Amino acid sequence: MKLVQAFGAVSLTVLLAACVPAATTGKDGMMADGAMKKDAVMADAAMAKAPGTIVAVAAGNPDFSTLVAAVKAAGLVDALNGKGPLTVLAPTNAAFAKLPAGTVETLLKPENKATLVKILTYHVLPLEAKAATVVSLAGKKVKTLEGTEITINVSGGKVSLTDAKGGVSNVTATDIAASNGVIHVIDTVLMPE
């Protein structure tokens, strides 16, 4: 009996749907009667406003392949996919290439995980600091997720960061949005003490 009722309900739904004229939309997302097709427009808007997490955004950019490999080796994917907000100072592949030969390969080995975690978390601020906020912090020390500080420098409208060992990294791109924070691109790997 339940099968017959279910079949009857489906048949009635199909029959009623056949009686209602189908809405047609043009290339502009407008229906024939001039109304907007709200579902499509809202879905497109949601997709445009919802970037992936910091890890997903970095993984989608080939210039961060070394950083993503390091994040995976360090076991930090879940932390950087977390709620946030976070700011990641993301070294490019070229930044990692500036390190002495063999450094990246050595850091990616399981026995060096603690050192890798320390270096990578030194590139994370436990807050969302967009470019305007970073510029307002000129001359100040900012605590990283690793626990020690970096110094923010602004000169001639350009931002650079000084690490615990006195190394300097230039910020080359800012405000790359992620669902759980923001990414700023840097040209040199920062080193904690």
Image: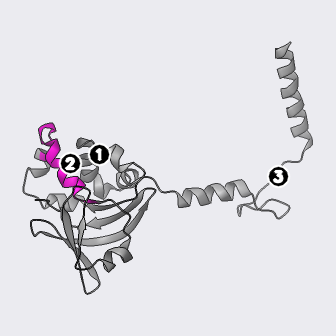
Type of amino acid under label 3: Ala
Is residue 20 at least partly visible in the picture? yes
- Which residue matches tag 2? 117
In the rendered structure, find residue 76 and report the number of the disc placed on it: 1
Indicate which disc residue 23 carries. 3
SS at circle 2: helix
* Figure quadrant of residue 3: top right
Q: Is residue 18 above or below residue 5?
A: below
User: Disc 2, disc 1: CB below 8 Å?
Assistant: yes
Q: Which residues are magenta?
A: 107-124
Main secondary structure of the magenta stretch:
helix
What residue is at 35 percent from the left and 50 percent from the top?
A: 80
What kind of element bears circle 3? loop
Q: Nearer the viewer, mark 1 or mark 3?
A: 1
Q: Is residue 4 above or below residue 152?
A: above
Q: Is residue 168 left or right of residue 140?
A: left
State the image quarter where residue 72 is shown: top left
Quarter occupied by residue 40? bottom right
Judged from this view, the residue extending furthest toward the top is 1
